[in-house]
Amino acid sequence: MPEIKLKHVVSCSTEDTTHKADNLLSSDTYRKWKAARSGEKQTSVILQFEKEEQIHSIDIGNEGSAFIEVLVGNSSAVKDQDYEVLLVMSSFMSPTESRNSTNMNRVRFFGPNQLQKSTAQEKWDRVKLVCSQPYNKNIAYGLAFVKFHSPPDKNDPLPTTSPKLTKLGQFKVKDESPSSGPSLQPGSLFFNRDNATKSSTPLKGKSIDLNLPATEGQFNLLRRQSASASPAQKSSEKKKESQSKPKPETKQQKAKSKSTQQVPFNRIMEGVVFVLSGFQNPFRGEIREKALDMGAKYRPDWTPDSTHLICAFANTPKYSQVKSAGGIIVRKDWVIDCHKRKQKISYKKVEKESRQNKATAEVKTVKEEDPYGGSTDENTDAEAEEDHPIPELPDFLRGKHFFLYGKFPNNERRLLLRYIVAFNGVTEDYMTEKVQFVITSEGWHDSFEDALMENTNLNFVKPAWIYAINERQKLLPYQPYSVVP
């Protein structure tokens, strides 16, 4: 497969003075690209191809990153939204390896089956690699190398067979050509023994050598001896014959054998097009990677061809959208269990114990349930919530109004808005009298004093307060995160 040539580095979020992003342009030198300092939340680099290419496979050499994601775009792309996912966030180091700084240079090869098919079928001239290391804040991470390959040329000659090995060190290899005489084939000894046994098959307790000519009198003698066998001997022989005959399968056994037929692991979830809601990285990436490994397709947002929503909470906008569209809503456990058992498990299971009867006897009934689902097109809402409700998102910020002031690095503004809305807070587009909290990452500003004159209930806080609430999953006092003059 031809290697795609890299032209130049378009941009990078950070780079070390020695291990610069330009080192990735020449993969043969294996000179690393690393972040300028340790503890970076996320690093990224955008590389330009010499021309538009279709990407068939990717080779990635790691340098301390726990997760690596590959996106593709064109030269006209100016926003993150213009890039499409080619390789979902993939794991290169486990949490234990990350904390101990071991196996930091793992190499992984991603073939066409591991890339997003719809994206891989198109041509691109720009690629974006996103690295993250959430488990160790004491290392500067990045990439050792990266190689992109285009599809093999149909005109390329087929690989020739390797030359025949005739000598290994001082020993000659035995010639196994057909002309070298009879060879011992696998199972030939058992085959010969079986033929030898068949050649002397007993006839009702008596046998003759079939290799020798037999007179008519000898055959008649054997027939008379067989006819004079005792009834007990005959019944014993009939019993043996009935035991040797295979019993016909029942309908239940046939259905069971059909259901247990092995399906290739990469086709377990063939036909499933899923969307994720309510999960954060790195766990979000792990769920997505497991589903893709089993043949499912991923969509960042609900589309007409989507089939399943893997949801963490019940009261998100995406949950309501899919519910109204009649989509199948499941929990993360469905993906995890299918991946663990290496088979597609129905998201509807039976055999649930009913409630205990207040009478003396305990009555057990079989009731259909959905251990993975929150709402399906066949279950009513009441049934779904009674059996396995998807947990509702906590409302830590209910009744609180926020205003985001100033500039925020990278996508921090979008992340803050997402957390505030998720925890039932309200964001205001302008500094109105409803605002109680002003979130800023720029420190104290002179205009804050004027705002306090008009609204004495204002509190100026750092984004870390919102992040801490999300990590601790409870409302925390804002005072330790206050912004003061």
Image: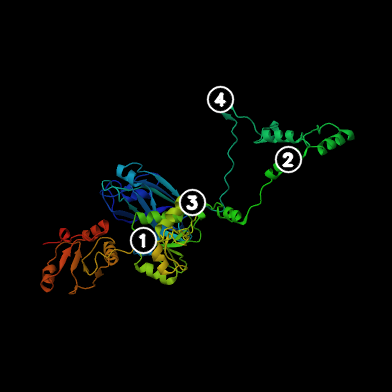
Vertical position of residue 30 compared to residue 434: above or below:
above
Assess whether mark 2 and mark 1 are in contact (beta carbons under 8 angstroms): no
- The structure residue drawn at horizontal position 23% and vertical position 70%, both measured from the top left corner, is 399
CA separation, marks 1 and 4? 65 Å
In three-dimensional space, the C-alpha distance between marks 1 and 2, rounded to whole angstroms, equals 65 Å
Colouring chosen for the image of the structure: rainbow
Q: Residue 290: x and y, percent?
A: 43, 54
Cβ–Cβ below 8 Å for labels 3 and 1? no
Which three-letter amino acid code belongs to the residue tagged 3? Lys
Q: Earlier in the sequence, mark 4 or mark 2?
A: 4
Identify residue for label 2: 237
Q: Position of residue 238 (x, y in %)?
A: 73, 43
Question: Image point 30% across, 42% down: which residue?
Answer: 100
Image quarter for residue 74?
Answer: bottom left
Instruction: Single out the mark in the foreground, 4 or 2.
Output: 2
Mark 1 or 4, closer to the camera: 1
Q: Is 63 or 198 nearer to us in this picture?
A: 198
Q: Is residue 83 left or right of residue 438?
A: right
| Mark 4, residue position | 170
User: What's under tag 4, amino acid-wise?
Assistant: Gln
Q: Which residue is mark 3?
A: 342
Count of numbered tags: 4
| Residue, disc 1 | 312
Q: Earlier in the sequence, mark 1 or mark 4?
A: 4
Tag 1: amino acid: Ala
